Amino acid sequence: MSDLVAIVYPSEVKAEEVRQKILKLQGEYLITISDAVIAVKTEDSVKLNQLVNTTMTGAASGSFWGLLLGMVFLNPLLGVALGAGAGALSGALTDFGIRDQFMKDLASKVKSGDAVLFLLIKSMTSDKVLNAIKDAGGIVLTTSLDEKKEQHLRDTLAAATQAKAA
């Protein structure tokens, strides 16, 4: 079962820095994530910065299959165009990992300019991951961790935030 963690950072740059650290740790097999999304709150909306752009992936995949199908019917350009359009549409409607509406609802509760890093974690070596990201600070917005693990995460990030302020 995966665990959801949402951490608030004062800027999108800081959240992206932590996401890049998490992706580096994934390369070192210290954490396995299913999804890592940054939600940025503006005055009137919430912008999601997804790890994978499903619209572009769908368009590229659709173009390829459209080209193959178009070659069968001797009209590859029409096939590419139709395939790209259909692929982009299906990609835009696809939502995997953490639900977009859930992230937007949760991120709308933070102050304007803040960024929320949403992580869907399959597994992790907690102590090593926390040591790698604790310097960035942050405030835990919500988690699906058990109470003991959540409190440890909150305490670790709060200590780093307080150390920066001092």
Image: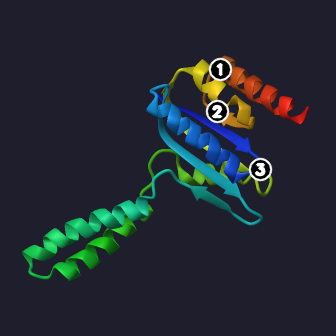
> Can residue 122 be seen by looking at this rendering?
yes
Residue 28 locus on image (x, y percent)? 46, 28
Residue for badge 1: 149
Q: Identify the image quadrant of residue 151.
A: top right
Q: Are marks 1 and 2 in contact (CB under 8 Å)?
A: yes
Specify the label residue 110 is tagged with: 3
Residue for badge 2: 143
Structural crowding at the residue carrying mark 3, measured as other residues with C-alpha within 10 Å and reported as few (<14), some (14–19) or many (≥20):
some
Residue at (59%, 21%) from the top-left corner? Answer: 128
Q: Amino acid at mark 2?
A: Thr
Residue at (53%, 53%) from the top-left corner? Answer: 50
Q: Identify which residue, 103 or 54, lies in the foreground.
A: 54
Residue 147 locus on image (x, y percent)? 68, 20
Q: Residue furthest right?
A: 166
Image quadrant in which the C terminus is located: top right
Q: Circle 2 sits in a helix, a strand or a loop, which is it?
A: strand
Structural crowding at the residue carrying mark 2, measured as other residues with C-alpha within 10 Å and reported as few (<14), some (14–19) or many (≥20):
some
